[in-house]
Amino acid sequence: MSVSEGWRGGDARTCSVELAKEQNGRTDKGTVLKTTSRKAFQSYLFAKIKNYATIFPMPYDDYESEGSIAQKTFIKEPEEYKVILLNDDFTTMEFVVQVLQSVFHLGAEEAEKVMLSVHKTGSGVAGIYTYDIASTRAQIAVRMARQQGFPLRCEIQKA
């Protein structure tokens, strides 16, 4: 079975479908449909194809074909991870604020709040990201600290 569709431009967009069924080495041509609606075209095509017991994925549908059974595809959101800065006695508060602003893109006030949380409670959440982004930002922060001679540490935990 072959399905072909064609769209001609213009204000009144028209589409046509030609269905062909191949049996015993010869091709029988099916109906030719002309319509101005893409939805009508899809409905007609789906009904015709259903008669042949084969479902093809339709444009703009989120169904996958598997024999004659349509299955809906579900997309799972990626898990989120917290980047946590840990307190130490040597890293300056100004450097922590600089890291929060440059690496984690926090504003001045938000960076200062996180820095005070790190200083007072021993840890503070710098941001929540997917795993790849969280690990990359933590590595960049630690690398910046090592270049400046500070022992800043970062942890990654599931949010």
Image (spheres, rainbow, N blue to C red):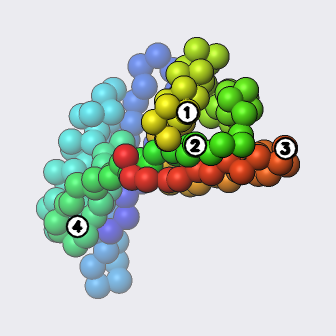
The amino acid beneath tag 1 is His
Mark 1 residue element: helix
Residue that numbered label 4 is attached to: 54
Can residue 17 be seen from the camera position used here? no
Q: Are marks 2 and 3 in contact (CB under 8 Å)?
A: no
Q: Residues within 10 Å of mark 3 (few under 14, many from 20)?
A: few
Q: Tell me the CA gap for discs 3 and 1.
A: 19 Å
Please tell me whether mark 3 or mark 1 is closer to you in this view: 1
Relative to 146, 69 lies left or right: left
Q: Is residue 40 visible?
A: yes
Residue 36: x and y in percent read: 33, 26
The reply to whether callout 1 and callout 2 are in contact (CB within 8 Å) is yes
Say what amino acid the circle numbered 2 marks. Answer: Asn
Among numbered discs 4 and 2, the one appearing first in the sequence: 4
Q: What residue does disc 2 label?
A: 87
Q: Amino acid at mark 3?
A: Gln
Instruction: Check disc 2: other Cα within 10 Å, few if <14, some if 14-19, many if 20+.
Output: many
- Residue at the spot x=28%, y=55% of the render? 73
Quarter of image, res 107: top right
